[in-house]
Image (tube, rainbow, N blue to C red):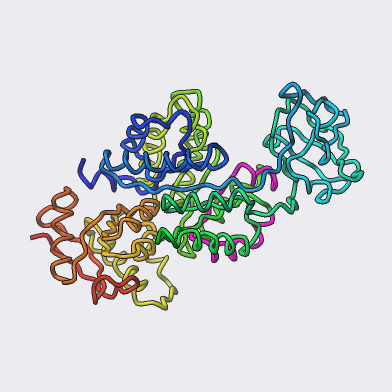
Amino acid sequence: MSLSLNASRATKIVATLGPASSTPEILERMIRAGVDVVRLNFSHGSGQDHIERAAMVREVAQRAGKEVAIMADLQGPKVRVGKFAQGKVTLEAGAGFILDAKRSELGDAQAVGLDYKSLPRDVKPGDTLLLNDGLIVLMVERVLGDAVHTVVKVGGELSNNKGINKLGGGLTAPALTAKDMEDIKTAMSFRCEYLAISFPKNATDMEMARQLANVAGEPHQHKTALIAKIERSEAIPVLDEILRASDGIMVARGDLAIEVGNAAVPALQKRMIKMAREMDKVVITATQMMESMIVNPVPTRAEVSDVANAVLDGTDAVMLSAETAAGRYPVETIEQMAAIAIAAELSEDVTLDADFTNKRFGRIDQSIAMGALFTAHHLGCKAIVALTESGSTALWMSRNKIHVPIYGLTSQLTSQRKMALYRNVCPLLMPQCDERDEALARAEALLVAGGVLKPGDTYAITVGEPMGHPGGTNMLKVCRVG
């Protein structure tokens, strides 16, 4: 496979591993079909399960000839009902239903226990509780001790351990549980590139996660990047603070929609993607993107539009959850998503000149990155090449829409894998060179051999002197292949 094929799609694909995709054969087909990041969902399975799956991902990716990033997604607080004697009950509209934090026996159609014991302290009469992804609606009538008495407003089937949300937010559950803290240690042991934090309310939650991850990563000489999953209404007013404390965000449209209402989510999605790009952070759009493909071999027209709109908004990646974890068509879903992304990207407007108006850069390496974009766009270069240790130069370049592929060349395997999530960046491993001219020659030879460049092509390349120092990019060169 030529390198140019890797760069034909700018938007990256995150796929969740699960029962439908846990064999090496299926995973290899998924990676070849276009997966760039593999998500391990820590809501399911043991720590050892995830260690074994991470090892499989590394091995299969190598076999497929493509390094992918691993994202460990923490479960977060379990705000859920308990279990029912019959496994499920049917709640009728108008009936009373009690959520009892002290109940130890199995639930029935009148009452059920709670995994989340603080619920009685977090709600008051008049509050609306949404269960099972908002399909069941309860109105709080009164709180008596540890029992929340409600009236069913919208009934339906309620089964074991379904989630609870409060309309408008306000649940005090901490973002990081004792289980999450153990899971962080597990994730650091297999050196995940990204750690996704569930339900953060503010920057402090992310800072605490960062400290825990840094301590857990120290024995493995590894620092991970943090993704804040925006799924609480409390996170919206402090988005900029959360972004500053994170390396990226996930637009987690499921829980967020339940808390703020479905109608508010599309505008929030656009705003979050724009904010992340402006602040040089990565952004993933997630939840129900290709939901119908769990059981159908083709997506709905609405799903095609949804994915395309996220691409046109500038998201770094689109994410698949149950579609690849438990669906019937994991490989076909990825193929469809990749095709939609490519088609949407062809219609994108490039507004580099407007993007740079009144923009100020405080760092030399950032200015060089922007200069490479501007030059490549106006000269019609075939590629932009960033020789980068940390991947930061490639990240900055990827924050602006441009139809010239960016190649991030690094000697660090961790940096190569992290760059797998950056929009329009094709990460490649190149041995460390101490001499600038030798590094430039090797970079050109690598891209010519991969079919990206051919004689007569021009390309822009950035490099730092002295070589091998992160944050040292200070030179831009425009070259023509001889």
* Residue shown at 35% from the left, 52% from the top: 417
Specify whether residue 199 is painted magenta. Answer: no
Q: Nearer the viewer, residue 39 or 220?
A: 220
Image side of residue 157 versus residue 270, left or right:
right
Residue furthest toward the top?
86
Q: Nearer the viewer, residue 303 or 96?
A: 96
Q: Nearer the viewer, residue 268 or 25?
A: 25
Residue furthest toward the left?
482
Q: How many marks?
A: 0
Quarter of the image for residue 87 reads: top right
* Residue shown at 15% from the left, 61% from the top: 442
User: What is the chief secondary structure element of the magenta stretch?
Assistant: helix
Q: Position of residue 34 (x, y in %)?
A: 35, 39
Q: Position of residue 8 (x, y in %)?
A: 29, 45
Specify whether residue 252 is painted magenta. Answer: yes
The vertical placement of 97 against 316, above or below, is above
* Residue shown at 66% from the left, 57% from the top: 201
Q: Position of residue 318 (x, y in %)?
A: 46, 44
Quarter of the image for residue 237 reads: bottom right
Q: Quadrant of the N terminus?
A: top left
Q: Which residues are magenta?
A: 234-261
Q: Position of residue 247 (x, y in %)?
A: 48, 60
* Residue shown at 74% from the left, 34% from the top: 82
Q: Quadrant of the C terminus?
A: bottom left
Image side of residue 266 versus residue 358, left or right:
right
Quarter of the image for residue 467 reads: bottom left
